[in-house]
Amino acid sequence: MPHVFTYGSLMFDRVWSLVVEGQYDKSAATLANYTRKAVVAAEYPAIFSHPDSSGVVGILYFNVSEADLLRLDTFEGRLYTRKQEQVLLDNTTPLSAEVYVVKKRYRHIVSENDWDPVHFETTGIKKFIRYYMGFNRTA
């Protein structure tokens, strides 16, 4: 079963548990050579390849079931593509993981502003959950 690297709303248990059915071990991880930016007029971020970036810090969920991976695909929608990348646990141990990356044709929705996980956790998550409740365990 694949590991899934999350870097935005899905890093937070409140959102993750609305989408997946399984219980998964998790760990902090870093995705090198990518950058995370806020999506225009939205509470969530997008990532894209950026060779000069110091990387994106996120949460890695281990051994995600195929059924939950399909739920995550539905949740991420048409703006993102799932691809396999190497992430680093503890900045030292490489591990292959599934990552949702904004498609090139939708890069116009990405702002130049960094996405702030602290703001999301304290303010944005309420609006996000209210808007995205329709994705609750549908696949």
Image: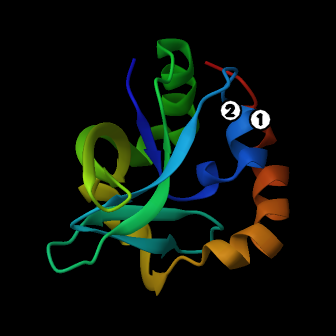
Numbered tag placed on residue 19 in the rendering = 2
Q: Residue 22, how many percent across, how many down?
A: 66, 20
Number of labels in the image equals 2
Q: Who is closer to the viewer here, 94 or 44?
A: 94
Q: Residue at left 34%, top 51%?
A: 101
Q: Residue at left 46%, top 23%?
A: 63
Q: In this view, does 95 lie to the left or right of 114?
A: left
Query: Considering only vertical position in the picture, is 133 above or below 90?
Result: above
- CA gap, disc 1 and disc 2: 10 Å
- Chain-order first, disc 1 or disc 2: 2
Q: Residue at left 80%, top 51%?
A: 129
Task: Please name which of the two marks, 1 or 2, marks the residue nearer to the observer.
Answer: 2
Q: Residue at left 63%, top 55%?
A: 9
What amino acid is found at the position of numbered circle 2 in the picture? Val
Q: Residue 2, how many percent across, how many down?
A: 38, 25
Q: Who is closer to the viewer here, 61 or 103?
A: 61
Q: Who is closer to the viewer here, 113 or 51?
A: 51
Looking at the rendering, which quadrant does residue 139 occupy? top right
Numbered tag placed on residue 108 in the rendering = none
Looking at the rendering, which quadrant does residue 56 occupy? bottom left
- Mark 2 is surrounded, within 10 Å at the Cα level, by few (under 14), some (14 to 19) or many (20 or more) other residues, namely many
* Residue corresponding to mark 1: 134
- Mark 1 is surrounded, within 10 Å at the Cα level, by few (under 14), some (14 to 19) or many (20 or more) other residues, namely few
Q: Is residue 6 left or right of residue 47?
A: right
Which scheme is used to colour this image of the protein?
rainbow
Q: Residue 36, how many percent across, how many down?
A: 41, 70
Q: Which residue lies furthest to the left in this view?
A: 51
Query: Considering only vertical position in the picture, is 79 above or below 72?
Result: below
Disc 2 on helix, strand or loop?
A: helix
Query: Considering only vertical position in the picture, is 15 above or below 109?
Result: above
